[in-house]
Every structure is written in C-alpha cells, then in structure tokens.
Amino acid sequence: MSRIGVFICHCGENIAGTVDVAAVTQAALDMTGVVHAVDYKYMCSDPGQTMLKDAIVEKKLDGVVVAACSPRMHEPTFRRTAEEGGINPYQCEMANIREHCSWVHEKGTPTTAKAIDLVRFQVEKVKRNHPLVPIRVPVTKKALVLGGGIAGIQAALDIANTGSPVLLVEKSPSIGGHMSQLSETFPTLDCSQCILTPRMVEVARHPNITLYTYSELEKLDGFIGNFKATIRRKARKIDEKLCNGCGVCQQKCPVKKIPDEFNEGLSNRPAIFVPFPQAVPNKPVIDLANCTYFKNGKCKACEKLCPTKAIRLDQEDQIEVHDIGAVVLATGFKTMPVSNFSEYGYGKYKDVIDGMKFERLASASGPTGGAMKRPSDGKTPQHVVFIACAGSRDRLKGVPYCSKICCMYTAKHAMLYQHKVHGGQATVFYMDVRAAGKNYDEFVRRAVEEDGVKYVRGRVSRVYEDDGQLVVKGVDTLLGAEPVEIRADMVVLATAVQAQNDAEELAQRLHVSYDPYKFFAEAHPKLRPVETNTAGIFLAGTCQAPRDIPETVAQASGAAVKVAGLFSQPELTREPIIAVVDRQPPPVFSHCVGCFLCKSACPYQAIEEESIKNRNGDVLKVVAKVNPGLCQGCGTCVSTCRTKAIDLQGFSNEQVFAELMCI
Amino acid sequence: MEALQAKARELLAAGTVKVVIGYGKGTGDTRRPIFVRAVERAGDLVVDAACTQNLATYLTKAEVRALGRMAIVALPSTLRSILQLAAEKQLREENVLALAVIDGGLRELATFDAIEEALATVPDALSDADQKLIDKLTAMSVTERRAFWAEELGRCVKCYACRSSCPMCYCERCTMDCNRPQWIPVASHAIGNLEYHMVRAMHLAGRCVECGTCGKACPVGIPVHLLTFFAEQSVRRQFGQKGGASAKLDYAMSTFKPDDKETFIR
Amino acid sequence: MVDPFEPKMTAFVCNWCTYAGADLTGTSRIKYQSNVRVIRLPCTGRIDFMMVLKAFSRGSDGVIISGCHPNDCHYTSGNYHARRRWMVFRDLLDFVGIDLRRVTFSWVSAAEGAKWAELVNEATNNVRALGPYKEIQQLAAVGID
C-alpha cells in the first residue's frame, strides 16, 4: 500500500489568501494512500524542506506531493529535497495550486474544490511513479569540426585549447574559407588574410588538432558521445612529407588555362596547384579532371621535375573511421550566382560581377594586384554602380530573407573603390541600410561623408551593355520615384547569401534539421542557437544563417564551449524521462510486434531495432528499442503505438489514466 | 479456377510453397478460408464472385507461418494488405507468393515490386452499396448520425470478429486486451462499444486497404467497415497517403508536413 | 433548489508551451473560470485519442487540447503529429455523431498568458451553453465506470 505525503504550501498569502489550505489538507488525508498531510507557510524555505525530509523518514513515505507553485518553478528543488530525504527524486510530484489556481480564480468553494482536485490528480499519479535513475552515456572526448573556414578554425582552436583532441576536416585543399578571399574586413578595414593566416598557422601547428584538408565526411554513425565518423581523405597525388612547397611543379605544368576558383575565375591556374600562396597546408593538389596525365595518360612533367620526388600519381583515396564524441558543423555559405539575374544580364556581361569577384579585384594578392581593373578590358572603371539586395528580400524571384552582410560589404567595396580610383564615382542603389553592429553605422556614414559614395534609395530594374559601358536603369524613391539612369563602367551585385549546394544532402546524412533555404536549424531560435536537435551536433557560422565575421567567431566559440561542456564530465548524465519498450518473460518477450511505426515518428531517430535471440542465436523476434542516449521524452512514439508496448517514464499510460480517473 | 488448382498442385508438388491459403466451399453458398498442404487437396480451391474475404489476415498467424513459404489466393485488396504488412515489417518477400486474381485472370506475383506494378492498373473504389451508405451518413445531421450508430453499435456483442478478420489487426496484445490500464471497457458496454470501434478505426487510419472484411465478418450485421473506410478516406483526402500503397512505409500518422492545413485549431 | 450547471472541463496541455503559458496567466493574475483541470504532458504528441475518450466517459463535459505553435515544438515535431491525429480523429468524432463543439483545440505559446485565459473562458462558456454531456454520460453510466 502506498504511503504518500502531501505538503500544502501557503506561499505566504499567495495561495492561502484564496484557497482554504486547511480544507485541502483535510481532503488530502482522506485520499486513499495518503498517510501524512500538512500545510506550511513556505515549503521551499529551509525549514519547509527540512520538514519534508523529516516526514519522509518518520512516516516512511514512498511518494511525495507538494501542492504549491508550478513544477516549472520548483520541481527540481523538491526532487532534490526528496532525494536528500531518502526516496528516489522521481517519486516527488507537484500540484500547481498557485499559477493554475489561487492566482487565477476568485476566493471561494469552487477554487478550493479545484485545488483539492489538482492534489488528487497528483496523488494518483505519484502512486504509479517508478523510481528512475539518471541515464549515463559514455563520451569519447574527441571532436570533429566539419569545415575549415573562420568558424571551423575558431571552434577547433577553442576546443583544442581546453585539452581535447580535434579532427578538422575541410573539403578544399586549404583551410581559410571565404574569409581568405576577402581583401579587407569591415568595419576596421583590416587586411583579411593578415588576421586570418596566423589562426590558420596556429591550427596547423596545434598539438591537439589533426588537420585533414582535401577530405570529406562520408558517413556519421552513432549518437552523442559515441559517433563513428567515416572520412575520405582524397588523394592529392603528392607525398606530403616529401613536398617542400618549392612550386616548381606549378611553374612547369603545361596545362595553364583553368579558371582559378580562388580568384573567382578572374585568372587561371595550372592543373597542379596550391589554391593561394598562404594556403595551409602549403602542399599542391592535382586537379584530376584537367590534368593531361589523368585525362589521356601523357605528360608527367611534375613527376619528372619535382626535386624531392614527391609526386605520387598512383596515390589512392584513403578511408578512415574515427571515434568522435561531438561534431561542430561549420560548412559555410555560397553566394547566389550572377547568372540568376535576368535583369542584370544572366551573367553574360563580364563587367557585372558579384561581391566576391570585387574582393579579388581589390585584394593586393589578387589577379590585378589590388588595382581596379574591370574584367572585360582591364580599363580602370570611372563609375561603378553597386546594387544591394540582389536576390535577397525578394519573395518572387530570390530569397525572402535579408543576407545581413551586404549593406556593410557594399559600403566597404564602395570605399575601397573610392580610395583606389580618386576621380571615380561609386553609386550604391539600396533599399535600406542595415548597419547594426558595433561601429557599423559610423562606417557607412564614413563612406558617404568622407569618401563621397552616392547612396540612391531605389531598385535597379535593368542593366544592359551599350558601347562598352553598362546602362543602369534605377529609380530614386526619396525624390518621388524619379527614374535614374547611369552609364557605369562596372556593376557590382551584392548577391544573396545562400546555403552551400550540398547542405541539404549533408544535413540528411547527419540527421540534422534544416530550414526551407537549407540553412541548418538551431534547436531553439532564441535560447539554443549553437545546438541542433540532433544531440551532439553543434553549429557555427554561416551554415546556420547569414552572419558576419565577429558573430561567426562568437558563435564558433559558443559551439566550442558546448563541446567542452560535454567533454568535461566522464559521462553524459541525462534525465530519465524517456520512452521504454516493454519486455516480458518468454514466450512473449515483448508486446512490441516490430511494426516500427514509432521509428518513423521519432524526431530524434532514437528508436532502433533489437533482435531477441534464443541461445542458438536464432532470431525469435525483432522489436523496437529506445536509445536512452538519444530519446528526449516527447512521447510521440507512445501515442503512435497501437499496442502500447512502448511507454514514457514519468508520464506513463498508467499515470495519465490514474489522473483521468480522478475526474 | 482450373488454372488456380493446377498452379496450386504445381507449387505444392515442387515444394516451392508449403501451403496454399485460398477459398473453399463453405456451408450453402458461402466460401471459407482453406489451407491446402497436400497436392491431392488442390481441387478444394475455388475462386468466384462469392470469394470476398481478405485472406491476408492468415499471413501473420504463427501457425500458418510455421508451415513454411506461403502462397495466397489474392484479391486486389489482399495484395494491398501484403504490401502494407511488408511495410510494417510483418512479411518478408521470400516467405509469400501471391496468386493474384485480377480482371478474371490468374497472375503469379513473387516480389513486392511485381505486386505494386500489378496494382497500378486496379482502381481503388468502394462498392456502390458502401459508397451510398457513406454518402447517406455524411448527409445526415450530427444527431441523426449519433442515433444511427447508437442503434447499430447497440447490437455489438464484443465478439471481436471484426478484429480477427482484419489483416492489419495483427497485434499480439491488442490495446483492448491490456488491463493496466484498461482504457476501453471490454464488456458489451454502451460506451465501450462506441469507443472500441472508434479506436480501431483510428488505428486503421492510413493502414486500411478497404477490403470490407470486417463488416462482412460481423455476426450481427453492423457496418463496422464504414468506420475504418471513413477514417482511411479522411487520411487520403487530407494527406494524400494511403494504406497498402507500397512495401516501403509511408504511414500518414507517423509522418507530417509542416504545412498540413486544418481549420479548427485556434 | 438546483445548482446551476457548471461544466467539468479537462485540459491536455504540453509542458513547454501551454503549461508555461498558463503559468504566465497566473503570474499576470489574469482571472478565468475555475472549471478546468489541467493534465500536464511533455508534448501534445503524447496525447492519445483514448485519453480524450476517457475524459468524456469519466464525466467531462468539455475537453481542451493545447500545445506549441507549429514550428515551435520543443521536441521539433510532436505537435505536427498531434495535429495530424486530430485532423482525422475530429472527422471520425463527427462521423459517429459526437458534438465537435465540446472539444477545443489550440496553440498557446509560453508567452500567451492572456490567450490561455481567453481560451478557457470561451471553451467553458460554450460548453455551459451546450449543457451537460448527457449522451456520453448516460452511455457511460451503464454498468461499469
């Protein structure tokens, strides 16, 4: 027979002023199974908690109901107290007679009757509570960071500095990402590579970081603390230990006319190449699609001429499997291609470029050495038009969201242009100027007031070529929608920030949710911005949403701390409010019939198949099994199960039934 | 019919299957399920317009499966049941051979793909009588419908013939048999009858192949199949998914679309 | 002298949104009618339609079901599954002749304290106007509880 103790809190006058607590106490004593019922002014106070603990011991209670404020307020408090009193913390429930009763109803008999009912519901529930033990999941203390841009670099460094090993996997031959392509960064106009390359070198030299470039994640199995990552290390065709970075192979390679991806196609590169001079690692890679040897078996010039004999043309991809405890996704973004814009020429006009191409033109290490030379004929453009929001905030033909960084980098580009071409004129067509960060608005004002950039509020309906120039037809809405036509020498589009082309496929492979624009989804938009709904996988940077460098770095550090927190304990302890599939003695073994409709309903892929075998190893039955490391306790599986073979600890069918029987 | 009997003889003689589940003559003009294991009994198999029961319910019975590989005389609804059972991991392709009766001809279908292909040409439509009755009910007012079902379900004696005859009711412990807690009263109890049939209809929603066997099985003639049809049609209409469409699970009630449209949530 | 009819209302709510919203109603001291008894569940996805049937057969005159707004579910998709279930269950309830006006569905977030009070008041008033749920309660009274 249950021995339940009921403790009714006055909460000062908050409850006692409206509810007749003496009557509730008396009613509780009359409930079957209740052996102790008292009321007290402040249950959460020290004396109140001591009273609870003493009662558990004296009256040998096996369950406790505290009728007070909301469980969302003090359930952890009273569960801890109950545990200190000697019973399992999950044998303690709270009846909410404050937020749901005394604070919202008038004083009177119906209110007291409701309080009594609420207590009765919890008494019946707690009689069916089972002692529950927190779940412990072992954790492999090694992190995988996917993506070697500034986000991945920052996260890897932060995690490595806490002492845990990190595997940083980057798809391209060098780390650095988009930040390495930028010329200067706003709002300081710091040289981008100057602030980035020290970090890149630190990553390469850090004892706790293993850097795999030109590598991809093929598969991620397992769950939080216990992932198995299969990495494909693509063959560079170079023996990295022998290569000393002399660059002879690149000079002597006969295939020279491949558009250079790093320079956005503004220059060419050979088939054996290092992406940029400050690449980390500074080892070349052979582009198999364009190499003469791999296309038709001839050449091998690099192999003949390499002074250290580092070329390995028969090198194969390597597959490695690593045990990982946590993953940080930092796979970055792409920009909307210029070819998307029919009104701006479908990408046919050489001098209609996007922001990234402008960065390479402006960069001192770019194809023009930082001189402003337009792509078509190399002339210095005297009038450059910048079009903001190209593709962003456009429900019809682009994406509805704001890409966040374009207002700032457009101002930056206009300023850089004005600095480099003193007689030139930059005009920016904008909708709004979004410069919300620290020193951001001052930066944009500087562009207008000190550098003479002209800002026209309006959109550009069309750009077309005419006699070596680009005619830009826009409108000035602040002058009453007066049409504006400019004959420009170059047009720079601030194209929308988008998720990478393979983002959706990667997310599906990792079972990470994503939004309709393929940006990875955070667990909660306000309070959990660096976690995903997949336990153990965290987010950093623009793969989650458009953002600038300071925010990316902050978020990467945030993700690193989450990983560090996970690794700080020997085991991961989780609340035991999880689903469990029943087990029965033979020959039934389980009421589960193995239909696995629950599996497709689970948002966390927490349901697995379990083969129940006899001693010969014959499979008798395949039933569902809940992974206690993954289940979050929503109970969707329980209501999906027809036979109720699966139940939710803490909110079991019997408990809910018992509450309903009190109606 | 001769083709079926010949095929059965061939399969049993060669040992390709260990049992042929089919229809045999019952009392009077009725047909009943038979389980032919000996080659000599193949002549007991009949197939005609009176054969309407969905035999797929036997594919999940332990005693039948223990015999070995099964062949089953399959109406289109039986084929759909086979697919749905496969989607719910209750059937393996190598354990069942469908002898499909479609458009008066006999086809041997050994794979789930073959079954899906064969079903592609068969429209799923309710019988005229059933459609008329559903239309009549939906046209009634709420009170009239309540009176209709109160009268019909008042005759229910909780024999569970409907549950036993349904291929999708293969749960070893039906929720009705669970007594801790006992959600639905088991006796032939006014509210228990209503609740039982509603729960069954909800459990079939998205899985029902509309064979109507449950209604035919009812010894007191309650049209219980209309409830499961209605729930299934509600699913088809609102979500576009249906029971028995494929051997790959596509269960409407465990999937969702973020923009499922409803009109009643405040 | 017969007491005026006061409906018994049972509410199934999710812990993270509606229950928190109801707490906010309390913190804001917004008053509403006291007929409702709340059953706290982790998620609306946990709500089985058998619970709703049980609530009615035990004597509830009205049922309120409320959870997180679509896209806001603490467990990502529990409310989407719940929504699908209700879309079919409601159709079925109507088909067997159960008055749909006795069941109220809603999305109430943790910030919508006022909405919870409005919802409870409106649902209670509606059910009071409909009267006690005699049809089900008479059926339930036959024999066992």
Image (cartoon, coloured by chain):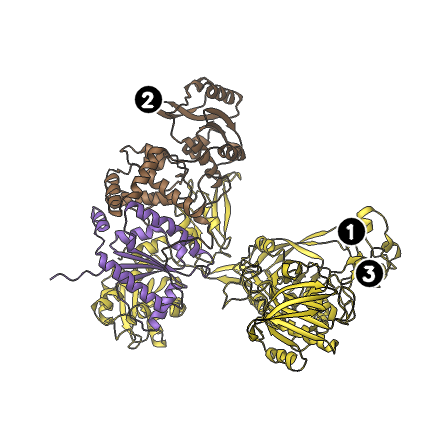
Chain colours: A yellow, B brown, C purple
**Amino acid under label 3?**
Cys
Question: Which of the 4 image quadrants contains residue B171?
Answer: top left
Mark 1, chain letter? A
| Residue B162 can be seen, yes or no | yes
In the displayed structure, does residue A38 sit left or right of residue A356?
left
**Residue A315 circle label:** 1
Which residue is the site of mark 2? B29
| Residue A647 can be seen, yes or no | no
Q: CA distance from mark 1 to mark 2?
A: 77 Å
Which residue is the site of mark 3? A243
Determine whether the residue tagged by mark 1 lies in a helix, strand or loop.
loop
Q: Is residue B97 above or below residue A413?
A: above
Dot 3, crowdedness within 10 Å: few (<14), some or many (≥20)?
A: some
Answer yes or no: do the residues labelled 3 and 1 have beta carbons within 8 Å?
no
Q: CA distance from mark 3 to mark 2?
A: 89 Å
Question: Residue A536: image x %, image y %?
Answer: 55, 60
In which quadrant is the N terminus of chain A drawn? bottom left
**Amino acid under label 2?**
Asp
Determine whether the residue tagged by mark 2 lies in a helix, strand or loop.
loop
Question: Which of the 4 image quadrants contains residue A550?
Answer: bottom right
Mark 3, chain letter? A
Q: Is residue B103 above or below residue A202?
A: above
> Front-most of A166 and A285?
A285
